[in-house]
């Protein structure tokens, strides 16, 4: 009995000693390989991602009539704001009422256009953005990168010491080649 207790105590002490030694040896993490992209350049008409630029052009063409209408209404509103000293009080009152009505119409049309634009933007770009995200992951893995930082997300918080880590142009070329 005493022998088995002694063996047990020695085994327990050795185990504790092993844990103590292991706890003192710090684990050295492998250095991370980091790449940088600037997603703001994806929408550049020259040198951007072709599919994304095409989607933005479609969106611009779809909403140009609404934008033009709002610009015309704003010009009409400005005209109503201009008064001459020869106008009578009833004429001034009528212009003010027309301007107020027009201002409400402009505000409503702007809000409707913003909501429709946001919805259509998502419809057009969400599949492309998913493809871009998947391609960026594959692109990073092919180059052995552990982390990709997007300069567009925190432009003041990222200082590039080595411009060679900026993979934006290479990624855009690769993406446009594989996703015409």
Image: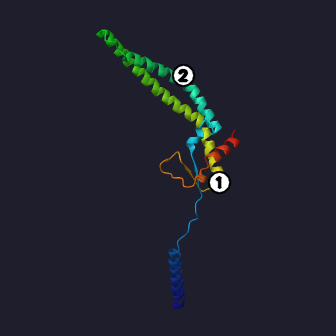
Residue toward you, 160 or 20: 160
Q: In this view, does 127 lie above or below 159?
A: above
Q: Position of residue 96 (x, y in %)?
A: 34, 16
Quarter of the image that includes the C terminus: top right
- Pointer 2: what residue? 65
Residue toward you, 178 or 169: 169
Residue at the image position 51 percent from the left and 85 percent from the top:
9
Q: Where is residue 146 in the image (x, y as percent from the top left)?
A: 60, 56
Q: In this view, does 52 lie above or below 170?
A: above
Residue at the image position 58 percent from the left and 30 percent from the top:
59
Quadrant in the rendering for residue 76: top left
- Pointer 1: what residue? 141
Other-residue count near label 1 (Cα within 10 Å), few / some / many at <14 / 14–19 / ≥20: few
Instruction: Identify the element where label 1 is drawn.
Output: helix
Quadrant in the rendering for residue 48: top right
Q: Where is residue 113 in the image (x, y as percent from the top left)?
A: 49, 27
- The residue most toward the left is 89
Instruction: Identify the element where label 2 is drawn.
Output: helix
Quadrant in the rendering for residue 34: bottom right
Residue at the image position 70 percent from the left and 42 percent from the top:
177
Q: Where is residue 149 in the image (x, y as percent from the top left)?
A: 55, 51
Q: How far apart are marks 2 and 1 (CA)?
A: 44 Å
């Amino acid at each position: 009995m005493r022998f088995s207790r002694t063996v047990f105590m020695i085994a327990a002490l050795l185990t504790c000693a092993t844990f103590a030694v292991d706890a003192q040896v710090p684990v050295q993490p492998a250095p991370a390989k980091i790449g940088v992209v600037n997603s703001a350049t994806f929408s550049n008409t020259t040198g951007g991602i072709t599919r994304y630029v095409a989607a933005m052009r479609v969106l611009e063409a779809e909403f140009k009539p609404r934008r033009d209408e709002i610009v015309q209404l704003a010009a009409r509103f400005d005209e109503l704001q201009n008064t001459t000293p020869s106008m009578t009080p009833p004429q001034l009152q009528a212009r003010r009422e027309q301007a107020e009505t027009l201002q409400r119409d402009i505000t409503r049309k702007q809000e409707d256009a913003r909501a429709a634009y946001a919805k259509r933007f998502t419809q057009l770009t969400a599949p492309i953005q998913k493809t871009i995200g998947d391609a960026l992951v594959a692109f990073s893995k092919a180059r052995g990168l552990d982390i990709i930082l997007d300069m567009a997300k925190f432009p003041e918080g990222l200082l590039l010491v080595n411009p060679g880590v900026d993979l934006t142009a290479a990624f855009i070329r690769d993406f446009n080649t594989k996703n015409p």
